[in-house]
Amino acid sequence: MQFFLELSVNGLLIGGLYALVALAIVLVCKATEVVSLAHGQLLAFGALFFYAGYVLLGWPLWAAGLLGLACGAVLGFAVERLCLRPLIGQPLFSGFLMTFAVFMVLDGIFALILKGQAWGFPDFLPAGNITIAGARVSLGGLSSLGICLLVFVLTVLLFKYTKVGLGMRATAESHKLAQGAGINVRTIFSLVWILSAVVAVVAGVMLARYYDIRFMLTMVAFKGLVVAMVGGLDSLPGALVGGLILGLVENVAAGYLDPYVGGGIMEVAGYILLLLILLVRPYGIFGLVRIERV
């Protein structure tokens, strides 16, 4: 029982980080209807910018954090303005392919910077472990989850209770109606990409604590996409629930099944979960079911 509790708690900790990646993807999808693959690079470069400030330049933690957030915001704005803005009015699949192209270009740049090496990421969160219901849990993991939940709550509050958030919600419902109501849809697109990039940077810094800065860090975007699809591509609460579910399923399945199959369960458990969910709920657990009349 203790083994199961430890696997579950640690799975929920990493699941909170998956949820933050999914949140960034859902924000863009809700407002622009484009499913983004570029956020894997946004989170990886965000961690890289933080590393540059904190380790290479020796800046204090708060300054390195601001550097990572600011550079990530600029990168997100550049992706929207230079790559996606020209595709407004084109089929949505064109936007999806563009985010994949951005992913590949930035992936090559990221690989050139790393040169095949892994950069050890500093652990700036509290060290040590505590015991919860007989399960050992790291203080750093709990702090990381707390930061992610705080960012999640602040993002949802901004989305629901601010003027900018109102514009985002109106744009998410209908671009034409929002524009008819006097909302600058193009500006909303830019703001959404900036906000989602900032969220991705926080996720990237927290994830780099687990994985260090390495080439495979960018692949977390695909797990974020799985979480977004499980929870619903238009649901902010779905991103949180889906992330926690994925982290729990991955960790428990790997803990019990890896000894029998030689490892690798964690890499496929999420996709099996996605397949099962989509067979029952094609729009995700909390996704809005859209009925199209022919």
Image (cartoon, helix red, strand yellow):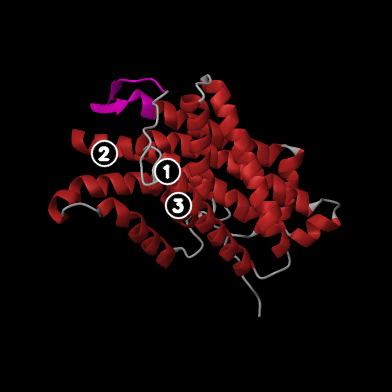
- At label 1, the amino acid type is Leu
Mark 1 and mark 2: span between their CA atoms? 32 Å
Residue 15, given in percent of the width and then of the height, sits at 40, 42
Q: How many marks?
A: 3
Mark 1 and mark 3: span between their CA atoms? 28 Å
Is any part of residue 242 visible from this angle?
Answer: no
Quadrant location of residue 73? Answer: top right
Residue 151, given in percent of the width and then of the height, sits at 55, 34
In this rendering, the label closer to the viewer, 1 or 2: 1
Residue 14, given in percent of the width and then of the height, sits at 38, 39
In this rendering, the label closer to the viewer, 1 or 3: 1
The magenta stretch is 125-141
Magenta span includes 282: no
Numbered tag placed on residue 7 in the rendering: 2
Residue 209 sits above or below residue 130 on the image? below
Quadrant location of residue 217? Answer: top left
Seen at 67% across and 48% down, the residue is 78
- At label 2, the amino acid type is Leu
Numbered tag placed on residue 255 in the rendering: none
First of labels 1, 3 by sequence position: 1
Seen at 49% across and 45% down, the residue is 21
Seen at 41% across and 39% down, the residue is 213
- At label 3, the amino acid type is Val
Question: Which residue lies under the disc numbered 3?
Answer: 227
Residue 68 sits above or below residue 291 on the image? above
Residue 19 sits above or below residue 120 on the image? below
Give the camera-side residue of 275 and 197: 197
Quadrant placement of the N terminus = top left
Question: Which residue lies under the disc numbered 1?
Answer: 114
Is any part of residue 105 visible from this angle?
Answer: yes
Seen at 45% across and 52% down, the residue is 227
